[in-house]
Image (spheres, rainbow, N blue to C red):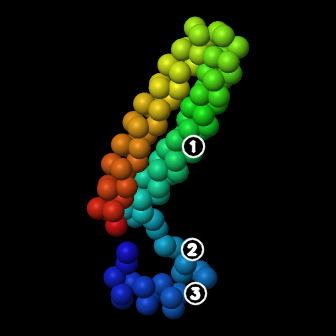
Amino acid sequence: MYPMSMMSRIMTMTVDEECKITVNQVDIAIFKISSAIKALERRTEVLEKQANEAQRKALAAKQMGNIKLALLCMKRRQMYLKEMENCSGSLLNLDSGLNSIQ
């Protein structure tokens, strides 16, 4: 990330000099992209749980003979899975952007 001369300078700094280091634009961009990636990963996990729960509810409704509720739950599951695909696409874009910045 830093040129070797910068790394050696950072390693030999005193505590007072370390406080004076400023964060550049690239570091800020990397932090923002990393934060967005973590948020999307959490969102994907939540959507996966919701999709599994909707599938479980659909099976329970079908066993009880409530076909309309089962279909509603499966449609909801499909909606969750579609949103997961959208999040996955966004994750790929953010990962490639992060790799190009680094």
The x, y position of residue 30, in whole percent, is 42, 59
Residue type at the position of mark 1: Glu
Give the residue pinned by disc 3: 14
In primary-sequence order, the first of circles 3 and 1 is: 3
Q: Residue 13: in sight, yes or no? A: yes
Counting from the top left corner in percent of width and height, residue 88 is at: 41, 44
Determine crowd level at label 3: few under 14, some 14-19, many 20+ residues with C-alpha closer than 10 A.
few
| Amino acid on which disc 2 is placed | Cys
Query: In screen coordinates, is 51 left or right of 24?
Result: right
Q: Residues within 10 Å of mark 2 (few under 14, many from 20)?
A: few
67 and 50: which is toward the camera: 67
Could you say whether the residue bearing mark 1 is in a helix, strand or loop?
helix
Q: CA distance from mark 1 to mark 2?
A: 38 Å
Q: CA distance from mark 3 to mark 1?
A: 43 Å
Q: In which quadrant of the rendered view does residue 27 lie?
A: bottom left
User: Residue at image x 58%, y 19%?
Assistant: 73
Quadrant in which the N terminus is drawn: bottom left
The C terminus lies in quadrant = bottom left
> Which residue is at a point 48% across and 84% down the rendered structure image?
10
Q: CA distance from mark 3 to mark 2?
A: 9 Å
> Which residue in the structure is indicated by mark 1?
45
User: Residue 19: which disc?
Assistant: 2
Regarding mark 2 in the picture, which secondary structure is present there? loop
Q: Secondary structure at mark 3?
A: loop
